[in-house]
Amino acid sequence: MIKRIDHIGVAVKDLNKAISLYRDVLGFELLEIEEVESQGVRVAKFDINGVHIEFLEPTSQDSPIYKYIEKKGEGLHHIAYFTDDIDGELDRLKENGIQLINQQPVEGSSNTRIAFIHPKSSIVLTELVSKGE
Ligand code: ZN
């Protein structure tokens, strides 16, 4: 079952520039900066009353975020929803003919398991998140 919005992902070319604006000017709390190798990104995580805003900077030209910025420019990349049963959700989506990017969960940041639903099926690129083992 989907429980809540976990985070909103925003694609940026320059993470430090995003941090200067959101932390130093807008006063958001910067929780951490983390590199997620499986996704080819460096992530700056901010907390706004339980919802995280994640700014994603590509670490290589193979990164999906690099390709996204090349194609569409910087901006809203995905919305992530927290579920306590990511395997069950993926099964349910498959049964309903929903196109998935990840057929199985992959490792996300901060000990999570994640999977993306294809934007062709979900309008906005959608990520499911659950706690890692
Ligand atoms: Zn995400």
Image (spheres, rainbow, N blue to C red):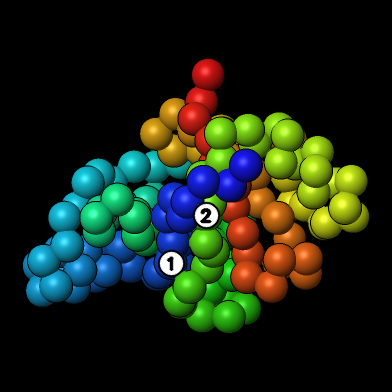
Q: For this view, does 4 lie left or right of residue 29?
A: right
Tag 2 secondary structure: strand
Say which residue appears at 45% left-offset and 76% top-offset.
Answer: 75
Q: For this view, does 28 lie left or right of residue 82?
A: left
| Residue neighbourhood size for the residue with mark 1, other residues' Cα within 10 Å, grouped as few (<14), some (14–19), many (≥20) | many
- The front one of 98 and 23 is 98
Tag 1 secondary structure: strand
Say which residue appears at 58% left-offset and 47% top-offset.
Answer: 2
Q: Which residue matches tag 1?
A: 10
Q: Position of residue 96 (x, y in %)?
A: 88, 53
Q: For this view, does 41 lie left or right of residue 49?
A: right
Rounded to the nearest angstrom, the CA distance separating label 1 from label 2 is 11 Å
- The front one of 58 and 8 is 8
Q: Amino acid at mark 1?
A: Val
Q: Amino acid at mark 2?
A: Ala
Say which residue appears at 21% left-offset and 64% top-offset.
Answer: 19
Tell me which numbered mark, 1 or 2, is placed earlier along the sequence: 1
Which is in the foreground here, disc 1 or disc 2? Answer: 2
Question: Ligand 1 closer than 8 Å to the CB at disc 2?
Answer: yes
Q: For this view, does 91 lie left or right of residue 8?
A: right
- The front one of 39 and 111 is 111
Q: Is residue 64 visible?
A: yes
Please tell me in which quadrant of the rendered image residue 86 appears: top right
- Marking on residue 71: none
Q: Position of residue 109 (x, y in %)?
A: 44, 38
- The front one of 127 and 84 is 84
Q: Which residue matches tag 2?
A: 80
Say which residue appears at 75% left-offset and 41% top-offset.
Answer: 90
